[in-house]
Image (cartoon, rainbow, N blue to C red):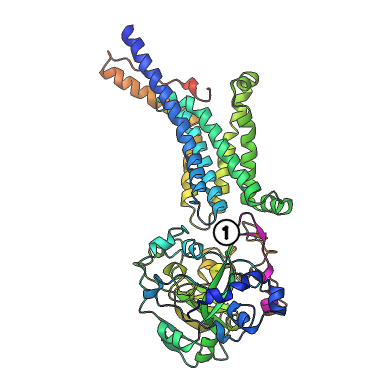
Amino acid sequence: MKIRSSEITSESVYLNRRQFISGAGAAVAGAMAIAACSPAPSPAAQVQPTTSAESSAEPPSTGAATDELGDPLTTFEAVTNYNNFYEFSTDKEAVAILSKDFVAEPWTISIGGLVNKPGTYGIEELLRQFPQEERIYRLRCVEAWSMVIPWLGFPLAALLRVVEPTSEASYVRFETLLDREQMPGQRSPWYEWPYVEGLRLDEAMHPLTLLSTGLYGKALLPQNGAPIRLVVPWKYGFKSIKSIVRIDLVAEQPTSLWMSAAPNEYGFYANVNPEVSHPRWSQASERRIGELGRRPTLPFNGYAEEVASLYENMDLRANY
Amino acid sequence: MTEKQQGRGIGAQRSALLQVAVHVAALVPLAKLIWDGLNGNLTVNPIQEITVRTGDTALILLILSLACSPASSLLGIRAAIRWRRPLGLYAFLYASLHFLTFSVLDYGLNPVLLREAIFEKRYAIVGFAAFLLLIPLAVTSTRGWMRRLGKDWKKLHRLVYPAALLVIVHYVWLVKSDIRIPLAYGGAVVVLLALRTRPVKRAMARARDAARRARLGRQPEQGVRTAQNGVVGND
């Protein structure tokens, strides 16, 4: 008899985190697979995303119904039709339409800079080499809306360990594909294309930091950053760069696209912080997609326990 | 005379129809909003969508209401002056919906969040100020208040210009990087404001006179109707 994983774990709907920690067994823990902070990928959570060819036929699936705080997942519909991806459009609902024919294969990522073993990896290679896990993360946009998304992917740290950063490497710089034909938004003169983002090396090595290749059990759709993107759940969404073609380890702090577009508004760190307003709007609350009204924003987007130590002795107001 | 009366009859009919059309056109965005709301077509972030749509509509109607006087006095579209009040009031309706969406639907009247959102963020302060300025204008838009206030009515209603400029600033401070659209609206407001200034009005009058003289010089038999300066600012 064939049982879908979504059926096995439907029970998790009824469990809040406390019950889950005290009572539920390891199998459920694996299926919940969260961010919950287990750095080691649990075998039960290892899934292969369907390839894009099959993906339209496969229904979206996930091993859980809520995140570790008990917040329900945002629907697949919303996650794939409400996107900030300026490479295609500044209109969040137009991105899915304009990116429909985006060709993401063949795709390679080159990894270089201050590493001992630079290399170029095809997506299939990465999928073979690094086991995919499901991670349910909250995504908090700097525009004060948020989602809960079941990502598929593997920790960036796993890949970085393979390429061996040298002792001079302090930061990681990421770059999105530059292709004005396929990405019409890149003709906009308002931004310095291609999209660039960066992390401090310890942030990049943190077990929560994910290279994602899928969501809801399917390969990433173009509007979500196909075929591979970053997910850093404790930072504002714009840090989670999409459609990555290049990763470099560098000595100096990289300047991101948003830092150069509006330096007083977008800093390098961009940690979710209800205490520090965006200069033009408050970050104290957010709209969770699918809910009416607002909910308070959590420090580090609810991941303070896991990541706050990275920023000890740092002035988070100055380093916004 | 009969010919003339007939002409006036048709003109009155047409102007009544146009008047209805103004009301209908101003209500279409609201109808569409309700329709899309009932059909779940307000994106997955409906509060955002409602906020943006009501704000856009309020600004467009405000600009159109500002364009009525110049359209009447400068372009000779006499009926336009009668569209000014409804357009202004509809602008206020959408501005009210915009503010209610923000304060009730979005912030649930949460005093702590609202205080922070309104008074600590400059875009919200100027938007709120613009809304406050529009309130006395909406209240005194009736004929009764026009009579009671006399000359002061006109002075009071000049507040619509600072209000419109504040709305533009509100918009410019809201958008991320590309400020072309708010600047285009701002350009329209500035042009409409400039048309009211004395030097521009005088220059326009001179140009009109010159044009009339030139026309009369060529075809002295043809009468030319002059636009009335007095129309500006009076309903």
**Residue B190 image point, x, y percent:** 50, 40
Q: List x then y, in percent, for residue A144.
A: 60, 60
Secondary structure at badge 1 equals loop
Which contiguous range is marked in magenta?
Answer: A286-308
In this rendering, is residue B131 above or below A171? above
Which of the image's four quarters has the C terminus of chain A? bottom right
Left or right for B170, reference B64: right
Q: Would you say residue A173 is visible in this rendering?
A: yes
- Return the residue nearer the eye: A2 or A174: A2
- Rendering coords of residue A183 (x, y %): 38, 66
* Residue A288 located within the stretch drawn in magenta: yes
Pointer 1 residue: A290
Front-lying residue, A264 or A139: A139
Q: Nearer the viewer, residue A141 or B136?
A: A141
Residue at 62 percent of width and 40 percent of height: B131
Query: Above or below — where is A103 with respect to B103?
Result: below
Residue closest to the eye, A291 or B3: A291
Residue at position x 62%, y 73% from top?
Answer: A12
Residue pictured at 54% horizontal, 91% vertical: A166
Q: Residue at x 52, y 47 (%)?
A: B37
Q: Percent position (x, y) of residue B121?
A: 65, 53
